[in-house]
Amino acid sequence: MKDIQVVGFDADDTLWVTEPHFQAAGREFGGLMAPWASAEKAAEELYATEMANLGTYGYGAKSVMLSMLETALRLGGDKVPAATLRKVLESGRRLLDYPMELLPGVEGVLKELRGRYRLVLITKGDLLDQERKLRGSGLKAYFHHVQILSDKRESDYRDLLATLGVEPRRFLMVGNSLKSDILPVLALGGCGVHIPYEVTWRHEHVEGASPDPARFRQLKDISGLPGLLAR
Ligand SMILES: [Mg+2]
């Protein structure tokens, strides 16, 4: 990967811990729905609501919060107590103010790569919340550019690379989601390094992907990235 000029980093579950917080909120929601549905049923219904709302609400904690309220009202009808809805709101609100926890090795790798490449943070979700997380992470100074997108489709990456003035083959994207961090970039002719995280949101799962090995690598953790770029 000698010709790379710009390295893009996903943020959630690539640089810092995110998904476990959302899974905890999902479990809490399942508990609150116990009078009306099993934990499995509540999880299924919540996921279906989130998917149906994605085009309108987008990604992120506030969207999840609205989808939890909608699902609670669908499962429990008009009998859902206000106290339960309040707890759903509180659980969602905690998704907007948990302390940031960087993944191991992240800061050292950014420090090492900063002088050699243009580093770009590319994340999707709620603008205000992603800005809060970036501030809390202390990582902002490492990035030449920060892009918070409503989605990470091929066209979103194409537009961003044009703005950055970089050819796709000189761009490498690093992230935990094959579906939104890697495959759209490979489709454009760029490179990808997939670093799986211990838990992945179901929406980000992808089946049967077999990316071109010349432009794609998988790493166990981020510490292998500088070595891979040097090769
Ligand atoms: Mg991610």
Image (tube, helix red, strand yellow):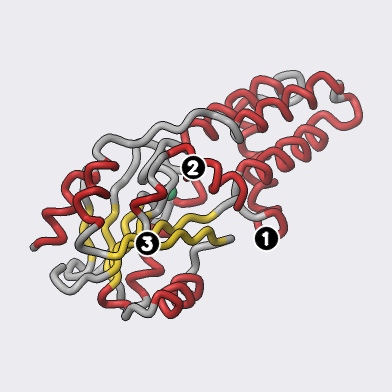
Q: Residue at x 66, y 32 (%)?
A: 92
Q: Residue at x 49, y 68 (%)?
A: 153
Give x and y (percent) for residue 102: 36, 35
Give x and y (percent) for residue 223: 19, 44
Of the two numbered discs 3 and 1 on the same chain, state the one appearing first in sequence: 1
Q: Residue at x 89, y 24 (%)?
A: 79
Q: Amino acid at mark 1?
A: Gly
Q: Quadrant of the N terminus?
A: bottom left
Q: Which of the pair 195/39 is nearer the observer? A: 195
Give x and y (percent) for residue 164: 40, 74
> What residue is shown with label 2?
135
Question: Gap between marks 1 and 2, in whole Å?
Answer: 27 Å
Q: Amino acid at mark 3?
A: His
Q: Quadrant of the C terminus?
A: bottom left
Q: Give the numbered dot on residue 196.
A: none
Q: Which of the pair 229/143 is nearer the observer? A: 143
Q: What element does badge 1 sit on?
A: helix
Q: Give the numbered dot on residue 55.
A: 1
Query: Does residue 35 show up?
Result: yes
Circle 3 or circle 1, nearest the eye:
3
Question: Gap between marks 2 and 3, in whole Å?
Answer: 15 Å
Classify 10 Å Cα crowding around label 1: few (below 14), some (14-19), many (20 and above).
few
Of the two numbered discs 1 and 2 on the same chain, state the one appearing first in sequence: 1
Q: What element does badge 3 sit on?
A: loop
Classify 10 Å Cα crowding around label 2: few (below 14), some (14-19), many (20 and above).
few
Query: Does residue 179 show up?
Result: no
> What residue is shown with label 3?
144
44 versus 50 height, above or below: above
Quarter of the rendering containing residue 62: top right
Question: Gap between marks 3 and 1, in whole Å?
Answer: 30 Å
**Cβ atoms at labels 2 and 3 below 8 Å apart:** no
